Structures are given as structure tokens and as C-alpha cells.
């Protein structure tokens, strides 16, 4: 399972470690494996950031969590899978689970008497570091400044205006210090107008090239809702039993279809859920160090091995899509795998 599910569980594990005041020595190795920067010290990795509305820019996971007064625990919630537009009819939830982003993830911050829901959003950094002052200086020296201003204002004329304010003034009033990429793109379109002087185009091209930046996209988690009350603790034993039962059912189905390799795999997964893995994965070892109960670690290890819904040679590639029983077994297995993820993350003792 090299997917956002395990990454998000690692976030939960590290979050609870921060809340309890511990820091596992394997964090650096996890960052290396995932190519994520959890500490905020490795510029070459994609930074994993959490931001509340009032969080300071640049705050990392630990900074942000420790600043949340009264935070007891982080929990993982699996959202409902939604089929994107344009997919063929008959696309099953198990097939959707194989697609990146097909299964949305939410985090729940648990306090003493209420919860806050945090949702991730992919943030695309600007491709160029241009400020409003750069725009004004460019226009001050451009021979086609009036035309460029008119074109820009026309493309953003839907902004609210005060009395006696024209579209250009309204645009300037709404611009942040950093020029948003939609405005930069509008400026490029305006400069393509044949009436704009070639010298103005060349000046902007030079400015744009000199201010180009190469930054990786990042995920930011933001508070999107609040609920009074604290949810009950998940029953790890029930979740474990349901997943084992479904793995055994999948094994029986695979055996009946003479898919011996898959039958063996599912039975092996059930054994991991029950007894734990023979050899602990380095990433999963982090959960032990962050205080996860052994039953939760075993369930999580089984979930990791049971995620068979993506990649070449996966369970989705078994050519039985027209078989109603195959689809039924696949959906039931997916639901219990996802249920195991939630149960494993929600059984961590509160700080």
C-alpha cells in the first residue's frame, strides 16, 4: 500500500506523538522513505504542512499541533468515494480506490468537548515570484501601459467596486502583495495583443524569466468544520474480526476461481491481522514508537498488505469485472480495509 492512506496514518501517528510530547527516532527515516519533509528542515522534499486559518506561514506539523491549545488526539476519517465525471459506466468503488485522489481523506482533531474537521487541499505554488510593485513599475515604463491596464481590468471586471471606482482601481485594491497566477496569466494574454509594443513584450519576458521559481506542490490541511461532543472510541476487536472474515471470504472466492496466488495472499493477510507481521516494515515500526496498541499495529499491518486495489498486477486486474460475485467480494473487502484504517487510527489513547 504505497498510497495516501499510509501517509495519512503516519501523519496521525506523528501528530499524536507531538501531542504527547514524544518524538520517535525513526521520523528521519520515514521522511526519507516518503520524500516528505515533516520536520521542515529538508528543502529538497515536499513539505507536509498543516495550516489553520490563523497559522503563521511556514509552520510545520509539530509547530502547528503544539500551538493548538487543548488538542487531545488526531483521528483519520475516510471520506465517501466519489466517481469523477467521464468514467465509464460500471466503474466500481474498488476500481476507483486504485486511482490517486479517488478516496478523500479527512483528519479529526479531538479536544476535550468538541472536534474540528480538517480537509486537505493541493496547493500549487506560483510559477513566478512577481509582486504588485513589479507590475506597477513595469506599467510605469511601458509605452502600451494604457492598453495593458484596460485589458487586465476587463478580464477581472467582476470584482466589487466602491462608488466612483473604475475596474482598474478595483483590481489594484483587491490584489495581494504577491501577484496571483490568474492575474499573471491575464497579463500575458494582454501582452499578446498585436497593438502592444514589441519592446513592452520583451521587457516583461525578461522580468518573468528572472522571477521564475520551481517549487513543488504541497498539501495543506485547513479547518473546515466543528462538531460539539467527542466521538466514541472504535472497537478494534470488532474491526479486526470483520477484516479477517472478509479476507477469508475473498480467499475462498479466489480459490473457487482457481486463483491460487490470490487465495494464498488473502489468507496470509488474515494471519497478519491476527498475529502481526513476521518482519516489521520500517514505516510501520513508527506506530509502535508512537504508542499504538499492539492490536492496532497488527490491524494496520494487515490493512497495508490487504490494499490490493491499485497498480499493475493488482486485484483490479483480475479479469472478472462481469462477475457479480467478484464485484461483491471486492467492494466488501475495500470497505473493511478502509474500516480497518479508521479503527486503527482511532484507538490511540488520548493524551
Image (tube, rainbow, N blue to C red):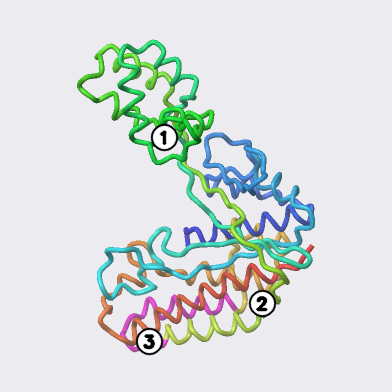
x, y percentage for residue 348?
71, 68
Q: Tell me which numbered mark, 2 or 1, is placed earlier along the sequence.
A: 1
- Judge the density around disc 2: few (<14), some (14-19), many (≥20) Cα neighbours within 10 Å: some
124 or 93, which lies in front?
124
x, y percentage for residue 278?
59, 69
In terms of secondary structure, what is the magenta stretch mainly? Answer: helix
Residue 182 vs 338, above or below: the answer is: above
- Report which residue position mark 3 lands on: 253
Which mark is on residue 181? 1
First to last magenta residue range: 252-273
Q: Are marks 2 and 1 in contact (CB under 8 Å)?
A: no
Label 3 and label 1: CA atoms lie apart by 52 Å
242 or 33, which lies in front?
242
- Report which residue position mark 2 lands on: 234
Task: Kindly state the secondary structure of the residue where label 3 is placed.
Answer: helix
Residue 66 vs 185, above or below: the answer is: below
Label 2 and label 1: CA atoms lie apart by 44 Å
Residue 50 vs 127, above or below: the answer is: below
223 or 123, which lies in front?
223
Q: Residue furthest left?
A: 194
Report the residue at 31% width, 84% height from top.
258
Q: Tell me which numbered mark, 2 or 3, is placed earlier along the sequence.
A: 2
- Judge the density around disc 3: few (<14), some (14-19), many (≥20) Cα neighbours within 10 Å: some
Amino acid at each position: 500500500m504505497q498510497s495516501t492512506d499510509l501517509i495519512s496514518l503516519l501523519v496521525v501517528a506523528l501528530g499524536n506523538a507531538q501531542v504527547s510530547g514524544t518524538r520517535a527516532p525513526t521520523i528521519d527515516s520515514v521522511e526519507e522513505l516518503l520524500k516528505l519533509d515533516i520536520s521542515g528542515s529538508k528543502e529538497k522534499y515536499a513539505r507536509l504542512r498543516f495550516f489553520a486559518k490563523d497559522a503563521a506561514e511556514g509552520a510545520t506539523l509539530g509547530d502547528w499541533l503544539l500551538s493548538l491549545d487543548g488538542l487531545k488526539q488526531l483521528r483519520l476519517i475516510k471520506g465517501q468515494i466519489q466517481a469523477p465525471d467521464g468514467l465509464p459506466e460500471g466503474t466500481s468503488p474498488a476500481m476507483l480506490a486504485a486511482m490517486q485522489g479517488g478516496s478523500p481523506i479527512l483528519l479529526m482533531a479531538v479536544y476535550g468537548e468538541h472536534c474540528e474537521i480538517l480537509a486537505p487541499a493541493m496547493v500549487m505554488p506560483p510559477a513566478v515570484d512577481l509582486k504588485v510593485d513589479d507590475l506597477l513599475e513595469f506599467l510605469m515604463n511601458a509605452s502600451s501601459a494604457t492598453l495593458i491596464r484596460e485589458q487586465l481590468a476587463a478580464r477581472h471586471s467582476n470584482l466589487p467596486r466602491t462608488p466612483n471606482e473604475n475596474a482598474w482601481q478595483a483590481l489594484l485594491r483587491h490584489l495581494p502583495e504577491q501577484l496571483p497566477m490568474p492575474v499573471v496569466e491575464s497579463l500575458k494574454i494582454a501582452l499578446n495583443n498585436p497593438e502592444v509594443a514589441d519592446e513592452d513584450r520583451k521587457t516583461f519576458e525578461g522580468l518573468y524569466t528572472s522571477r521564475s521559481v520551481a517549487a513543488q506542490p504541497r498539501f495543506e490541511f485547513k479547518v473546515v468544520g466543528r462538531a460539539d461532543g467527542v466521538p466514541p472510541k472504535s472497537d478494534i476487536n470488532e474491526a479486526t474480526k470483520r477484516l479477517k472474515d472478509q479476507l477469508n471470504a475473498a480467499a475462498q472466492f479466489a480459490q473457487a476461481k482457481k486463483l491460487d496466488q490470490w487465495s494464498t495472499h488473502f489468507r496470509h493477510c488474515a494471519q497478519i491481522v491476527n498475529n502481526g507481521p513476521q518482519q516489521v516494515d520500517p514505516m510501520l515500526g513508527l506506530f509502535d514508537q508512537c504508542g499504538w496498541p499492539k492490536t492496532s499495529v497488527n490491524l494496520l499491518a494487515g490493512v497495508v498488505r490487504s490494499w490490493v486495489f491499485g497498480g499493475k498486477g493488482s486485484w483490479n486486474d483480475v479479469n472478472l469485472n462481469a462477475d457479480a460475485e467478484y464485484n461483491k467480494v471486492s467492494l466488501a473487502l475495500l470497505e473493511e480495509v478502509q474500516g480497518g484504517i479508521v479503527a486503527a487510527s482511532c484507538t490511540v489513547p488520548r493524551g
